[in-house]
Amino acid sequence: MMQRWVVERSRLSLISLLSVLLPALSLSAAVSATTQSDLTAAGQPPLKWYAETQSIMGTRVHVEIQHEDEAYAAVTVATVMAEMHRIDHAFSPYKETSEISLVNREAGAGWVEISDEMVALLQKSAEISNLTSGAFDITYASVGRYYDYREGKAPDENSIRAAIHAIDYRHVELEPNRVRFKHPLVSIDFGGIAKGYAVDRGIEILLARGVVQGSVSAGGDSRILGDRAGKPWTVGVQHPRDSNKMAVLLPLVDTAVSTSGDYERYFEQDGVRYHHILDPSTGRSAAGAWSVTVLGEHAMITDGLATSVFVLGPEKGMALINRLSAVDAIIIDPNGRMTYSDDLSGL
Ligand code: ADP
Ligand code: MG
């Protein structure tokens, strides 16, 4: 894939793009503020934009598209939102009636029949686990389910020791239409890819309905379709220790971007920050970074890789990104130092 995220390939533009600090947008990777219309070249009528924001999957979902017909645009955006709700209902481990809750209840005891969509998500998860040597692992939830970030609760050493052996993506045995866990205490959670997946599904809906300019975002996962009235979209990466600031502004065209940060869901106890990205080898929060932003073609991949690189830490994480084609990363390490993957720093 062509690299389309840095539009002006000069050193000057890189410096001005990557080191600006701007007043906050409220999202960790917020798409530039909506305007009702953008002026096109002189003499042409302004383009019409349609935008909507909803709370879905425990986060802010924002869809913004350009279309001449407002009624058509409204139906299109509603279709994307409905798809997000559907994905939430099927794959939220917090909903007892979801397919993933059924699997978590029964797959430890034997085979469970599952949907094609569940099979595809399990396959993709296994691929990302293999690619990242297990830094990404949906069975992290075997321990992860004992954390409650809102209540400020973390499992004690004994509870971790009792469940840590259930964390291993190779415990998930998949056949074309069924799954089982090879360890009775396994629990899975698609939290590391679900938002990216939902964003990709949203973009597919836009494409199928003939939209050529738009964006879909769910919390820290966004994907941009086309440009914005001839100019790139601007996606900001939040400063990980000052929510009023942006650490980076990225000009993007036809790109997915995901940010994983230790500031999204966390509590502090005795000077330790307990946050929602867990190192599968310890069952504890990974400490290798403040935030990781990954750019690529599909949001499910950038989402999964951002979580993975966070676990791997700056050194191993950046080495992985530089080995892969068509993905880039910006890592802010625990000293607040920002590093870029080769394709971004070589500009
Ligand atoms: P968010 O966009 O929800 O802030 P991320 O994309 O950074 O978060 O992913 C964090 C989520 O991924 C966690 O809330 C959890 O559901 C899941 N997760 C945490 N650790 C791992 C891991 N090592 N592998 C896979 N998924 C994980
Ligand atoms: Mg992620």
Image: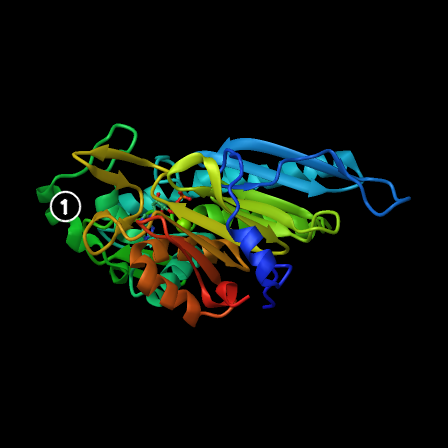
Displayed quadrant of residue 63: top right
In the rendered image, residue 100, in percent from the top left (x then y), is placed at 36, 45
- Mark 1 surroundings: few (<14), some (14-19) or many (≥20) residues within 10 A: some
In this rendered view, identify the residue nearer to me: 322 or 81: 322
Residue shown at the point (28%, 53%) measured from the top left: 288
Image-based side of 91 in relation to 52, left or right: left
Displayed quadrant of residue 71: top right
Q: Amino acid at mark 1?
A: Ile
- Which residue, as the protein is rendered here, is positioned at the far right? 43
Quadrant in the picture for the N terminus: bottom right
Residue shown at the point (38%, 63%) measured from the top left: 318
Quadrant in the picture for the C terminus: bottom right
In this rendered view, identify the residue nearer to me: 272 or 90: 272
- Residue 275 vs 314, above or below: the answer is above
| Pointer 1 residue | 160
* Tally of marks: 1
Displayed quadrant of residue 173: bottom left
Residue shown at the point (49%, 41%) measured from the top left: 246
- Residue 55 vs 28, above or below: the answer is above
- Which residue, as the protein is rendered here, is positioned at the far front? 12
In this rendered view, identify the residue nearer to me: 29 or 141: 29
Q: Secondary structure at mark 1?
A: helix
In the rendered image, residue 212, in percent from the top left (x then y), is placed at 72, 51
Image-based side of 299 in relation to 4, left or right: left
> How is the structure coloured here?
rainbow
